[in-house]
């Protein structure tokens, strides 16, 4: 058994324009880090195109149509003030969502213990009816609904440690008691949501806002006291990780002070719960992380922890 790695070259052709933090160099830094010989045992797979039916479990058809209508024949266009699309962006967004659904299929089929999706555009800010914060489709939520609809798993949890609140995942999960979101994030910070009193219609949203300057000790403390006990109590049948690495101390877009060791530690803690509740079934998908060196080191630590799950 092994860890699967999904990606596609078109994701690097999603051009956000000069000076944009969510740039193609991010994906290249990730893939370069995963060329190290320590990752030779990864099984590398090409991300397929997501099907409309998969995307429309989260996003209404009218929104999906509007995204593709906005993709320009040349140059760039804006879906919102931060979310840029270029000629390759439509396919890149389909590959990003398709990576997660294909990873869910493969893990459910026993083709790998777990999977990491090295994709862009990211997804956790995309709400059902609008693009936000660099995100076009809600990749993690699409994966969760795919797991439940196609594979008939009962409960799916998303654990999101990106520095920004996963408002899109929250919007998709809000009314469903069998979908649970755990989100630790800096507050105040974009997008402005994610207070602790945002709990979902069934207490299925667990938001953990962290003050600027918080570091390793406080992060691990909230995982030990809140995230892991609540995740264990929820007993998910499948776990998806929204793996954003912009809480790293070197990241320019926020003010938390985590290290790559913290991401590896949190990943291992999540995997321990998944091993007992979900037969180890975990899919992780790339969200944020904008300092290239910090991102590369953090992804290496995260994927290394996923690979070590084979020895849990």
Image: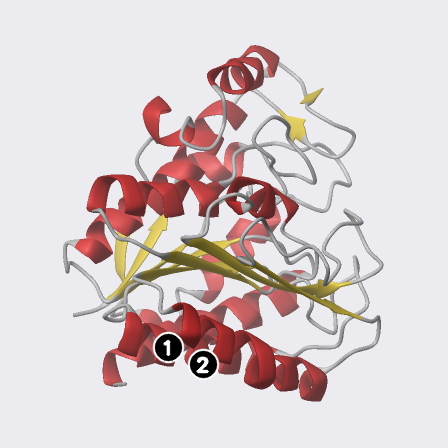
Q: Nearer the viewer, mark 2 or mark 1?
A: 1
**Numbered circle sitting on residue 269:** 2
Rendered residue at 30%/47% (across/down): 147
**Numbered circle sitting on residue 291:** none
Mark 2 touches mark 1? (CB < 8 Å): yes
| Residue reaching furthest to the front | 202
Q: Looking at the picture, tell me which residue is in the foreground, 299 or 239.
A: 239
- SS at circle 1: helix
The image quadrant that residue 71 belongs to is: top right
Picture coordinates of residue 233 (x, y %)? 42, 74
- SS at circle 2: helix
Q: Looking at the picture, tell me which residue is in the foreground, 198 or 151.
A: 198
Rendered residue at 43%/59% (across/down): 157
Give left or right: position of 312 versus 269.
Answer: left
The residue that mark 1 highlights is: 273
Picture coordinates of residue 146 (x, y %)? 32, 41
Rendered residue at 48%/32% (across/down): 93
Give the CA distance from mark 2 to mark 1.
Answer: 7 Å
Residue 72 appearing in the image: no
Above/below status of 118 relative to 96:
below
Picture coordinates of residue 34 (x, y %)? 41, 65
Query: In the rendered view of the protein, which quadrant contains the N terminus?
Result: bottom left
Neighbour tally class for label 1: few under 14, some 14-19, many 20 plus, Cα within 10 Å: many
Query: In the rendered view of the protein, which quadrant contains the C terminus?
Result: bottom left
């Amino acid at each position: 058994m092994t860890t699967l790695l999904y990606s596609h070259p078109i994701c690097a052709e999603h051009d956000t324009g000069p000076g944009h933090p969510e740039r193609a160099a991010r994906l290249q830094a990730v893939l370069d880090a995963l060329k190290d010989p320590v990752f030779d045992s990864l099984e590398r797979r090409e991300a397929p195109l997501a099907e409309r039916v998969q995307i429309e479990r989260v996003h209404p058809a009218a929104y999906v149509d509007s995204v593709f209508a906005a993709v320009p024949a040349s140059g760039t266009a804006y879906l919102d003030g931060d979310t840029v699309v270029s000629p390759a962006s439509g396919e890149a967004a389909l590959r990003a969502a398709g990576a997660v659904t294909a990873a869910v299929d493969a893990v459910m089929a026993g083709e790998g213990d777990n999977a990491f999706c090295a994709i862009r555009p990211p997804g956790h800010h995309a709400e059902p009816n609008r693009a936000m914060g660099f995100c076009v489709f809600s990749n993690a939520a699409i994966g969760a609904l795919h797991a439940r609809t196609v594979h008939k798993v009962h409960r799916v949890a998303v654990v999101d440690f990106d520095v920004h609140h996963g408002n899109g995942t929250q919007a998709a999960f809000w009314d469903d008691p069998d979908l649970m979101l755990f989100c630790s994030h800096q507050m105040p910070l974009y997008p402005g949501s994610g207070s602790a009193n945002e709990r979902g219609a069934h207490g299925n949203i667990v938001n953990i806002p962290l003050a600027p300057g918080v570091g390793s000790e406080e992060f691990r403390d909230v995982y030990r006291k809140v995230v892991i006990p609540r995740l264990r109590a929820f007993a998910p049948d499948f776990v998806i990780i929204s793996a954003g690495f912009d809480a790293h101390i070197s990241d320019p877009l926020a003010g938390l002070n985590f290290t790559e060791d913290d991401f590896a530690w949190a990943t291992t803690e999540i995997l321990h719960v998944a091993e007992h509740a979900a037969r180890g079934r975990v899919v992780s998908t790339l969200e944020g992380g904008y300092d290239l060196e910090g991102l590369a080191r953090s992804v290496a630590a995260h994927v290394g922890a996923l690979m070590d799950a084979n020895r849990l």
